Image (cartoon, rainbow, N blue to C red):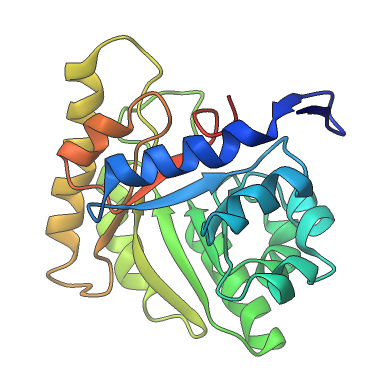
């Protein structure tokens, strides 16, 4: 049965669970699936959670607060882990820290310091990833690869933070070799960093259109949205 969500998106609720189960069967134990729920409503998210999904990704702090701020989904679905995967403005860091378990898009020392301060004030530890612009695209957020090692060493000294990995987005192109090269670049960067920053071991790379290539390069987290909600 189809329903019209708040954003005017038509969703076939029966398909969501089928899509999720098919993806889990395909991925197996090679990586964890972060279900990207931007533009989708709580009823659709609950369909995923009822299938066993527990890692959820949102792009905007406002959407995190609207959908999860009352704490009801956390109460009903123990183990729910909320990842902020979109660009985070420093002025919104406190709310991101308040509602999210992981902030996977940190792209400056200043932002990391703000998250650290907010986490301390709220009495919690936040797991973070550094976002890397491996492909060097001007329209993308993220650190230059050459800036990552020094920043990683600085970030791990901050209290109330746990740096657990690196995140990137590949170009949205029909060029598998180029895409896989970007993922390979992030993997190599991680391999270099983890010798001096042992906690920085995980990779978040691969989305609905390129997750199979990300798996080939050892991605630990796949951020998939549109393939779930078709």
> Is any part of residue 168 visible from this angle?
no
Quarter holding the C terminus is top right
Can you give x and y, in whole percent of width and height, for residue 65 in the image? 80, 58
Q: Quadrant of the N terminus?
A: top right
* Residue sitting farthest toward the top: 174
Residue 31 location (% of width, % of height): 29, 52
Residue occupying image coordinates x 30% and y 70%: 153
Count of numbered tags: 0
Q: Is residue 103 above or below residue 36?
A: below
Seen in the picture, residue 211 relative to 36 is either above or below; the reply is above
Say which residue appears at 54% left-offset and 54% top-offset: 51
Query: Is 149 drawn above or below residue 222 in the view shown?
Result: below
- Answer with left or right where residue 149 lies relative to residue 195: right
Report the front residue among 155 and 28: 28
The quarter holding residue 64 reads: bottom right
Left or right: 194 as drawn, with respect to 203: left
Residue at x 46% of width, y 23% of height: 138
Instruction: Please name whichever residue, 97 or 91, is drawn nearer the observer in this view of the structure.
Output: 97
Name the one closer to the observer, 68 or 98.
Answer: 68
Q: What residue is at 20 percent from the left and 55 percent from the top?
A: 190
Along the horizontal axis of the image, is 16 left or right of 73? left
Counting from the top left corner in percent of width and height, residue 140 is at: 49, 30
Q: In the picture shown, does residue 134 fall above or below 89? A: above
Q: How far across and down, in percent of the image, does residue 218 sit? A: 18, 47
């Amino acid at each position: 049965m189809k329903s019209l969500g708040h954003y005017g998106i038509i969703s076939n609720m029966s398909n969501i669970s089928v899509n999720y189960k098919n993806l889990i069967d395909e991925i197996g134990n090679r990586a964890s699936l972060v279900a990207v729920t931007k533009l989708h409503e709580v009823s659709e998210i609950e369909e995923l959670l009822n299938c066993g999904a527990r890692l959820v990704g949102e792009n905007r702090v406002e959407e995190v607060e609207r959908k999860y701020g009352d704490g009801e989904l956390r109460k009903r679905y123990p183990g729910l882990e909320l990842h902020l995967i979109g660009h985070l403005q420093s002025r919104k860091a406190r709310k991101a820290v308040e509602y999210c378990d992981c902030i996977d898009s940190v792209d400056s020392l200043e932002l990391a310091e703000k998250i650290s301060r907010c986490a301390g004030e709220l009495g919690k530890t936040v797991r973070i990833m550094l976002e890397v612009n491996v492909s060097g695209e001007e329209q993308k957020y993220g650190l230059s690869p050459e800036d990552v090692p020094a920043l990683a060493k600085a970030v791990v000294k901050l209290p109330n933070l746990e740096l657990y990995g690196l995140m990137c987005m590949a170009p949205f192109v029909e060029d598998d070799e180029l895409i896989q090269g970007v993922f390979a670049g992030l993997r190599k960067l991680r391999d270099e960093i983890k010798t001096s920053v042992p906690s920085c071991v995980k990779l978040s790379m691969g989305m609905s259109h390129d997750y199979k290539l990300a798996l080939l390069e050892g991605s630990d987290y796949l951020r998939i949205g549109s393939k779930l909600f078709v």
